[in-house]
Image (spheres, rainbow, N blue to C red):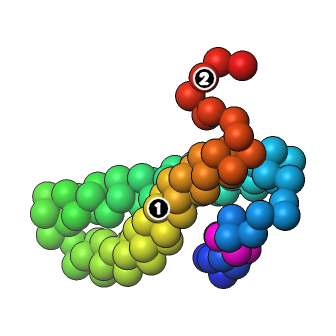
């Protein structure tokens, strides 16, 4: 997914450099892609929160019971939590950047993004 996001952002950035594009049409297509990425972001947020809760719950249980296997489980959760945080960070920042791209597309199309239509 990270490769697809980067490739799509690069594609839109290159598109924004041109002037021979129907930006109103491209903005509508862009919204569809942003919707896909927003859905992906939501799913990863849910998974991230789940792993964070499991990590904290496992750590608390370890402190209460002194069961060493729970410490191993907590470490495993932390190892998985780090890539989830990094991927979610990429998704969040990319989707926010896509909002800016959308605004620039509307500007190039001569449409004010903040006026009711």
Q: Which residue is painted at 84% across and 60% down in the image?
A: 21
In magenta, the rendered stretch is 11-15
The answer to which of 31 and 88 lies nearer the viewer is: 31
Image check: 60 left or right of 8?
A: left
Residue drawn 37% across the image and 75% down it = 82
Side of 49 where 28 appears, left or right: right
Tell me the residue at 42%/73% (across/down). Answer: 86
Mark 1 vs 2, N-terminal side: 1
Q: Is residue 111 visible?
A: yes
Residue under numbered circle 1: 93
User: Few, some or many C-alpha atoms within 10 Å of disc 2 (few <14, some 14-19, many ≥20)?
Assistant: few
Q: Quadrant of residue 116?
A: top right
Q: Residue furthest top?
A: 116
Question: Disc 1 on helix, strand or loop?
Answer: helix
Asked whether the viewer can see residue 41, the reply is no
**Which residue was labeled with disc 2?**
115
Q: Quadrant of the C terminus?
A: top right
> In front of the other: label 1 or label 2?
2
Query: Who is closer to the viewer here, 38 or 26?
Result: 26
Image vertical order of residue 11 relative to residue 65, above or below: below
Residue 94, percent across and down?
Answer: 54, 63
Q: Is residue 50 left or right of residue 103?
A: left
Q: Is residue 56 magenta?
A: no
Mark 1 vs mark 2, CA separation in Å: 25 Å
Q: Nearer the viewer, residue 107 or 86?
A: 107
In the image, 94: left or right of 37?
Answer: left
Q: Within the image, what quadrant is residue 109 found in?
A: top right
Q: Is residue 72 above or below residue 36?
A: below
């Amino acid at each position: 997914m990270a490769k697809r996001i980067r490739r799509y952002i690069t594609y839109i950035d290159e598109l924004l450099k041109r002037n021979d594009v129907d930006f109103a049409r491209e903005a509508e297509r862009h919204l569809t892609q942003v919707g896909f990425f927003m859905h992906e972001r939501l799913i990863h947020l849910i998974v991230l929160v789940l792993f964070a809760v499991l990590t904290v719950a496992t750590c608390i249980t370890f402190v209460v019971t002194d069961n060493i296997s729970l410490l191993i489980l907590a470490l495993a959760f932390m190892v998985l939590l780090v890539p989830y945080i990094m991927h979610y960070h990429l998704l969040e920042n990319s989707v926010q950047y896509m909002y800016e791209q959308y605004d620039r597309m509307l500007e190039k199309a001569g449409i004010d993004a903040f006026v009711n239509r």
